[in-house]
Amino acid sequence: MILPGGLWLAAFFVVPMALMVSLSLQTGNLVDGFRQTFHWQNYTYALDTYRDAFLRSLWYGLLATAACAALSYPAAYWIAFRAGRHKSTYLVLLLLPYFVSYVLRTVSWKLVLTDNGPLLGPLRDHGILPQDFHVLDTGFAVVSGLTYNFLPFMVLPIYVALERIDPRLVEAAHDLYASRAQAFARVVLPLSLPGVLAGVIMTFAPASADYVNAEVLGGPRDTMVGNVIQAEYFDNGAYPVASALSFALMAVLLLGVFAYARALGARGARSVLDVAAGR
């Protein structure tokens, strides 16, 4: 039964990944072609040249993940424990904007944050903000866009984990004279932790590798590694360097996932995967 899924992953993940690793060790150009020379210097050159963009991507991804967690947990908690029979309605409303194209949502965020837009324009006109104040072309705008675009990746795993908690456990904590804060800290939060960690993994990886938000909302000093990879592939034709950057980014993200799995242990890691899958 795992054969169809295994073949799908082999065709669209394992094979392209092997080709990318092979390409990252080649030398040449678009005119003369590329040949395999096991040129490991592609990695050192790529990481030395684009170190700032690489580190900036991880930092922006970490900030966006933390912001998503701070915004998602209260929303998921309220839907799981307070929404009653309207849970499905609130989940649909939460996900409704994400039926629109990713690029259109990012461009819409740009219209909101523009200097004369509906948010900052009135504040500047009334003298609340200085005339030279701006949000676009800053790291804050990029992180805001990442947070907005990847919010469901955090909300849904946390909601699934909270939904699985038996309310009788919270009632038992109150029967043992635990306050609401104590019941949350000792019962709800530990049981929902696999959902939080699953959300972190599912958010941090795509947010760190994103390039649309930095392209639309950021400035020259906010370039992320995804923008560099795109430029190396499509503008410069430096396929080996772009492949080296892509594989290095994937390796760092996978190391983060394995670190979470090791910190949780085998049982905790399996719980994270179950929550991510909605089981």
Image (spheres, rainbow, N blue to C red):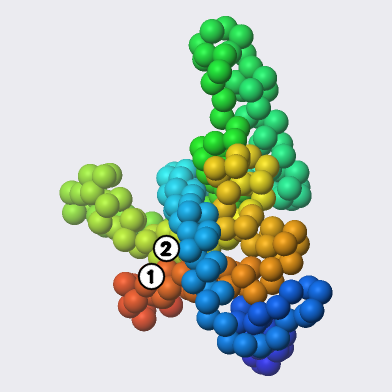
Instruction: Say which residue label 2 marks.
Output: 197
> Which secondary structure, mark 2?
helix
Please give the name of the residue rendered at 42% of the width and 69% of the height, measured from the top-left corner: 256
Task: Give the crowd class for mark 1: few <14, some 14-19, many >=20 residues within 10 Å.
Answer: some
Task: Give the crowd class for mark 2: few <14, some 14-19, many >=20 residues within 10 Å.
Answer: many
Do callouts 2 and 1 mark residues in contact (Cβ within 8 Å)? yes
What is the number of callouts on the image? 2
Q: In which quarter of the image is residue 111?
A: top right
Q: Is 128 situated left or right of 136 in this image?
A: left
Q: Distance between the residues labelled 2 and 1?
A: 8 Å
| Placement of 21 over or under 233, stated as above or below | below
> Which secondary structure, mark 1?
helix
Q: Nearest the camera: 42 or 74?
A: 42
Residue 75 visible to the viewer: no
Instruction: Say which residue label 1 marks.
Output: 260
**Image quarter in which the N terminus is found:** bottom right
User: Disc 1 residue type?
Assistant: Tyr
